[in-house]
Image (cartoon, helix red, strand yellow):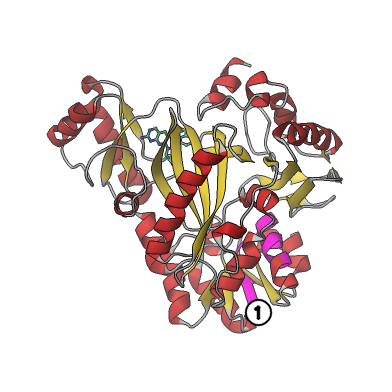
Amino acid sequence: MFDKVLIANRGEIALRIQRACKELGIATVAVHSTADADAMHVRLADESVCIGPPAAAESYLNIPRLLSACEITGADAVHPGYGFLSENARFAEILEEHQITFIGPTSEHIQVMGDKIEAKETAKKLGIPVVPGSDGAVTSEPEAMKVAKAMGFPVLIKATAGGGGRGMKVAHTAADLGLALSTARAEAKAAFGNDAVYMEKYLTKPRHIEIQVFGDGQGNAIHLGERDCSLQRRHQKIWEEAPSPALNAEAQKEIGDTVAEAMRELNYRGAGTVEFLYEDGEFFFIEMNTRLQVEHPVTEAITGIDLVLEQIRVASGAQLVHRQSDITFSGHAIECRINAENPRTFRPSPGQITYWHPPGGLGVRVDSGVYQGYRIPPYYDSLIGKLIVHGKTRNECLMRLRRALSEFVIDGIETTIPLFNDLILQPDIVNGLYDIHWLEKYLAKS
Ligand code: MV4
């Protein structure tokens, strides 16, 4: 097992990782920018290193500075959390070259899944159902037209270096195709320095359902069920739940077993998320994330498995202790993302938290890196906490969520709490009847 882990992140996820390290008896190193000197992740770590000015490019994303911090402190492993360098294959590779363990998959697996065409080809070869579309990249308009006519409009053009919705363009008819193709390529070039694009049949009303997987890189892999993350605005998830209100146990087992078998064939190591669109009872692979996700606690709630602790264990060379037959799903969990934002416009609301009273009680978990008096800096993501509620049934979970939201008091800044207070009153939310467009439509009409 490791002696000392450097956590290359900030906020609630840095604390989450510290907690797992503490339980394993591993010393922790926090890194921080000058803007985060007063952050909780710095205060609670065994050691801390200031790695640069506020801009992420000069601190949390700066590989040479992180390597220096490893060297100064003698850390033998790095946990990247989510965001920042968590899916940077080059970072994982450099750490490997320096005999520092990257707590995550191999750099090769990160690389493959980072290229969306390669990811999709890999998924398809492994027997995972994918969205119908072009065979690899599409380079010319005549070629695009041939593909589109073969599968029928509407079609979607996606950047191979993309993900998270950037560089995507819909063509509803043949007349739209030329412009959609050139705009998608130009946007992809500007955003990622790579103008390669591919095409898919555009699904008009899917749900976003993702499967949590876990492997040990020694031939063992399992799935931990799904999360429904359909409630999003501009590709930012705000509410995630498990199990999905749209699936039954048989559908869950079928897709889960398919994905787990694929991960065994890949010899995948660590936590991963296989993302699907789900429409009319069918699953279509879109992407795979090779990191821990913000919404991992809903899976922890219904499986009782500590995902971060298991990440650290398998990274240190241990085998998975859980077999698929050991995994049972218990009850229902919902996560609400508490962002320092205006609850209608989602405009960031940095500033000082003058009062902080988180909810508690049975089935309630709050993961946060803030405290009363803390000043939220304007430089980073606006997520300041996550409220995760667990109940025996979805109804009990919703009941507890209403209660927990009513207890939560945050003064001094705007937060997304009022939005959740509205959402839990909507019949479609209560009944679990929502797709990926539901939230934007709701916000437009209310
Ligand atoms: C799609 C799609 C419809 N059809 N692919 C958006 C982000 C990226 N991860 C994939 N995305 C989509 N891919 C096909 N073939 C619709 C979306 C999409 C979406 C997906 C998940 C959650 C929210 C979304 C919001 C808009 C579009």
Place residue 30 in its image quadrant.
bottom right
**Observer able to see residue 38:** no
Place residue 442 in its image quadrant.
top right
Place residue 15 in its image quadrant.
bottom right
Ligand 1 found in image quarter: top left
| Residue bearing mark 1 | 4
**Observer able to see residue 284:** yes
Would you call the spot at circle 1 few (<14 residues within 10 Å), some (14-19), or many (20 or more)? Answer: many
Which element type, helix, strand or loop, lies under badge 1?
Answer: strand
Magenta stretch? 1-19
Q: Position of residue 422 (x, y in %)?
A: 72, 24
Drawn side of residue 132 relative to residue 229, left or right: left
Residue at 65% in and 25% down: 429
Disc 1 marks which amino acid?
Lys
Residue at 63% in and 75% down: 5
Q: Position of residue 246 (x, y in %)?
A: 55, 31
